[in-house]
């Protein structure tokens, strides 16, 4: 599969969030979307990233963004994670990894010097027309909200 690039139309998707709601990218046309892919609920890096987005959500909303997280975890896992950390945005369950694969956020990566297959932590910033404006591959999990604003304003 050819990797997605900035300037390309974002692949449309549909998934179920932690509250059982259907989330479609097409519902967000006219809004800027932060679509972030992360490996697993309740792990240190993923928790830091989600909490950074939670803590920076007011600033991100002021910039006109909506936030959507996606991982292969179940709706039930997302429900607990979202509740535990009071996350104010949807987390889509993608256990079949269809959305992850459509965005190139699942595949081979290097962890601790070994090649493994798994979720590749990536954030896509999608503009109001559904076009990928920015791709962040080196995610600063502890300060991701600020990282997004800096990358957006470049």
Image (cartoon, rainbow, N blue to C red):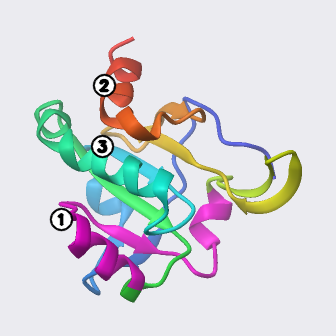
Question: Do we see residue 126 in this rendering?
Answer: no
Residue 118 image-quadrant placement: bottom right
User: In terms of image quadrants, where is residue 80?
Assistant: bottom left
Left or right? Give the position of 35 relative to 101.
left
- Tell me the crowding category of disc 2: few under 14, some 14 to 19, or many 20 or more residues within 10 angstroms, Cα based: some
**Secondary structure under the numbered disc 1 in the rendered image:** loop
Q: Residues within 10 Å of mark 3 (few under 14, many from 20)?
A: some
| Residue, disc 3 | 52
Mark 3 and mark 1 in contact? Answer it, CB < 8 Å. no
Sequence-wise first label, 2 or 3 = 3
Instruction: Check disc 1 and report the residue beneath it.
Output: 86
Magenta segment:
77-102
Cα distance in 3D space between marks 3 and 1:
12 Å
Does 80 appear in magenta? yes
Could you say which disc has been placed on residue 149 in the image? 2
Q: Foreground mark, 2 or 3?
A: 3
Residue 7 position within the rendered picture, expressed as x and y whole percent measured from the top left: 54, 29
Among numbered discs 1 and 2, the one appearing first in the sequence: 1
């Amino acid at each position: 599969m050819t990797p997605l690039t900035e300037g390309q139309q974002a692949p449309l998707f549909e998934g179920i969030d932690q509250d059982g709601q259907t989330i479609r990218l097409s519902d967000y046309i006219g809004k800027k979307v932060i679509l972030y892919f992360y490996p697993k609920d309740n792990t240190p890096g993923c928790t830091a990233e989600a909490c950074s987005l939670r803590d920076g959500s007011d600033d991100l909303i002021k910039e006109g963004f909506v936030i959507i997280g996606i991982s292969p975890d179940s709706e039930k896992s997302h429900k607990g994670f979202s509740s535990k950390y009071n996350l104010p945005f949807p987390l889509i369950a993608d256990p079949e990894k269809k959305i992850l694969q459509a965005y190139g956020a699942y595949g081979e990566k290097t962890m601790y010097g070994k090649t493994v297959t798994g979720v590749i932590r990536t954030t896509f910033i999608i503009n109001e027309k559904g076009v990928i404006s920015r791709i962040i591959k080196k995610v600063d999990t502890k300060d991701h909200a600020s990282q997004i604003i800096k990358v957006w304003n470049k």
